[in-house]
Image (cartoon, rainbow, N blue to C red):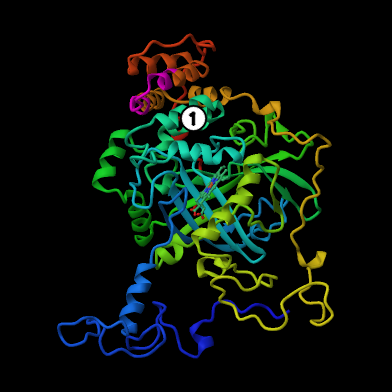
Amino acid sequence: GAPQTRTPTGAETGAPATANGQQGAFLTTAQGARLRDTDHSLKAGPRGPVLLQDHHLREKITHFDHERIPERVVHARGAGAHGEFTAYGTAEAVTRAGFLQKGRTTEVFVRFSTVLGSRGSADTVRDTRGFATKFYTDEGTFDLVGNNMPVFFIQDAIKFPDIIHAGKPHPDREIPQAQSAHDTFWDFVSLHTEAQHHTMWNMSDRGIPRSYRTMEGFGVHTFRLVNAAGETVLAKFHWKPKLGVHSLVWEEAQLLSGMDPDFHRRDLYDAIEAGAFPEWELGLQIFPDTPEETFAGIDLLDPTKIVPEELAPVQPVGKLTLNRTPTNFFAETEQVAFHVGHLPPGIDVTNDPLLQGRLFSYVDTQLTRLGGPNFAQIPINRPHAPVNDMLRDGFHQHAVHAGVAPYRPNSLDGGNPFPAGDDDHPFVDVPVQVAQAPKVRANPASFDDHFSQARLFWLSMSPVEREHIIRAYTFELGKCYHQAIKERQLQCLASIDPVLCAQVATGLGLPAPEPTVPVADVAPSPALSQVGRQWPAD
Ligand code: HEM
């Protein structure tokens, strides 16, 4: 029942730890034996051979041999920063989450990423960007694992291996999709038309952000919030960058990929070091928690749909400031482990089938990536709340647990550890009604509309943004070897907008298919997506 001891610090071992995680003035082995020489192996005479008994040689090389861990299966390339989140208090009526109470400040770590490239790929490629935030709240960690686009390619997590297999480099040539053979990606999204909305966002300027500092972020899924009275609402999370939303133009993105592949991470670190701390407002779109889980006819469990801000304005609830760069990329940015199931009391999941699959996937992949079940003990992943769990042993266990292995009920350990009472703010699952319906492998009919929101997005673009979208489709589809795939994607565009379809077809030198929707009687809008929200006076 005693609270866990996490990783022993220098103080616990009796030796003061220095800032770089090392102790003492002299070079030692990993066992603390002082070394006289680390530049020469132990040899039988000056001309060798090298002796197997040289433990220092073997320790040094063996550890080096194991310095790398697997990169993330997706979102492998990223950059992170520390910061703080301060709540305005405007969410108090809808959630009892302590970190959203007025004036509360919570430490955070944010990792931005591309999705498809490997760890060494370029920052400015056309791709979705990850925007994952770890809030170290005193009620347990909250991870908001979002993207810079508000929708996703698939409605059901069972399709995730498919979309990623279609998008990652070809197994034979290992040539990234972003630079060469595009057939598998376009094959998938043209056959699996629920991907068309997200694909449109990727082909827009959102796919090539100017900076992490000028990206919006979205939790994508609808979550369920619970207030102190136990009342619930449905909500979507939004990050709004203080600098507004800005993108590169395609030619800049291409040049930067060659001239400075680290452009985005450099920009993030340089801004923070210069004291120009990046800031975002966290906002909520809030919907009544009705049995249908819809709003304005939109199924809130469908992650390929947005709810337009005109129908449900984003209400600011707090401010994020990134003010500290990591000390060690590996220890922090590489080892951080986010999970959509890390939720504090007051925030709960919904039955969005994409979210439900994610709840399984993250810890599963981290068991391999971070070498076993104890990665929550890695410094960057440690909660800033007291931890008294029932988890024991396993690879890389750093805690020295006292007493009996925990089990409940017990009479030997006085019944420890105890579940919290209601007054102690426990996490309580919302007792949502489960449908009385047969088990099926199927989507609800309300998930069937795959094109109208892609059309909405296209029609909301300014003339110059439309031009960029047309050019992006033309460039990317132009990389496909298979004409049938280009033709099938043009068919999808014919279901989105005839003007877009005709322009891309012209660019590809192919006939435009018959449109299935009329030409819209809507003038292109001004550059709405470039207009930042008016911030309260600083
Ligand atoms: C990683 C976002 C859907 C599996 C990530 C990361 C982000 C993210 C931001 C990077 C986290 C980091 O920086 O460490 C999203 C969003 C999704 C989505 C917004 C849809 C709304 C899915 C689905 C699956 C999945 C459906 C699987 C069924 C993974 C895996 C990782 C990952 C395995 C690597 C995690 C790690 O190695 O730590 N995702 N993702 N994601 N995602 Fe997703």
The x, y position of residue 327, in whole percent, is: 40, 68
Looking at the picture, tell me which residue is in the foreground, 25 or 223.
25
Location of residue 526 by image quarter = top left
Circle 1 packing at 10 Å, graded few (<14), some (14-19), many (20+), is: some
On screen, residue 325 versus residue 239, left or right, reads left
**Residue matched to label 1:** 188
On screen, residue 158 versus residue 55, left or right, reads right
Residue extent of the magenta highlight: 475-487
Mark 1 is on which residue type? Phe
Asked if the stretch drawn in magenta spans residue 229, the answer is no
Does 143 appear above or below 160? Answer: below
Main SS of the magenta segment? helix
The x, y position of residue 294, in whole percent, is: 71, 32
Outermost residue to the left: 47
Q: Which residue is located at x 73 percent, y 75 percent?
A: 406
Q: How many marks?
A: 1
Asked if the stretch drawn in magenta spans residue 476, the answer is yes
Looking at the picture, tell me which residue is in the foreground, 14 or 528.
14
Location of residue 312 by image quarter = top right
Q: Which residue is located at x 78 percent, y 50 percent?
A: 430
The x, y position of residue 194, in whole percent, is: 56, 28
Location of residue 487 by image quarter = top left
